[in-house]
Image (cartoon, coloured by chain):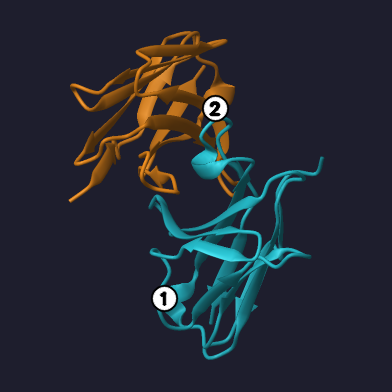
Chain colours: A cyan, B orange
Amino acid sequence: NAGVMQNPRHLVRRRGQEARLRCSPMKGHSHVYWYRQLPEEGLKFMVYLQKENIIDESGMPKERFSAEFPKEGPSILRIQQVVRGDSAAYFCASSPDRSGLNYGYTFGSGTRLTVV
Amino acid sequence: SQKIEQNSEALNIQEGKTATLTCNYTNYSPAYLQWYRQDPGRGPVFLLLIRENEKEKRKERLKVTFDTTLKQSLFHITASQPADSATYLCALASWNTDKLIFGTGTRLQVFP
């Protein structure tokens, strides 16, 4: 079991471009969460998805950000028209149950987005 | 407002001693609390989970306590080693939410 796979590990985008971050959860995990982390700050919740459904997107900015978890394929976090303030590490986590109730979350290694 | 507070200052201890990290929360009624370890440039790794009706949990050299009256969890690493040096995050979830909320973490440095 390869764990949670995120790609790319590093992504550089110019202001105004689109960033697409991918996350393949662990096999058997149907719950996916995206978090953002700035240097010296904690993990900030962005969105929680189950297959084909967004369950909670309360932490995601209303504009420019979107997420999906299709029936087939990885979960995608999409940031349109990136700005410098979007530069951060974006982590994806998966769990076999809601909120990691019994087993905790398994995190990927993150995608480090740099906007220049 | 809801807050999860961990010591922002790094904790420096000598190898072999017990490290104790604190997690305090306000305006939460957590159903359970989790602790994670994060190394630089990596994603957090799940360590332990403790439920609201449990006072203490142990796993090898790790021990977690959960006091819902004090609204506090303590995380202990006994016989600490330099390899334990990392940032440790606590996270809470309530029964009526679908996500974990994380504290900002405490950096632990164990020196020989």
Q: Position of residue B22 (x, y in %)?
A: 30, 26
Tag of residue A85: 1
Which amino acid is tagged 1? Gly
Q: Position of residue A7 (x, y in %)?
A: 72, 63
Q: Residues within 10 Å of mark 2 (few under 14, many from 20)?
A: some
Q: Position of residue A50 (x, y in %)?
A: 60, 57
Where does label 2 land, which residue? B47
The residue sitting at 53% across, 65% down in the picture is A54
Where in the figure is residue A93, as x and y percent of width and height? Answer: 59, 49
At mark 1, the secondary structure is helix
Q: Residue at x 43, y 44 (%)?
A: B100
Q: CA distance from mark 2 to mark 1?
A: 31 Å
At 39% from the left and 52% from the top, the residue drawn is A40
User: Between tags 2 and 1, which lies in front?
Assistant: 2
Whether residue B86 is visible, yes or no, is: yes
Task: Report the front residue among B110 and B27.
Answer: B27
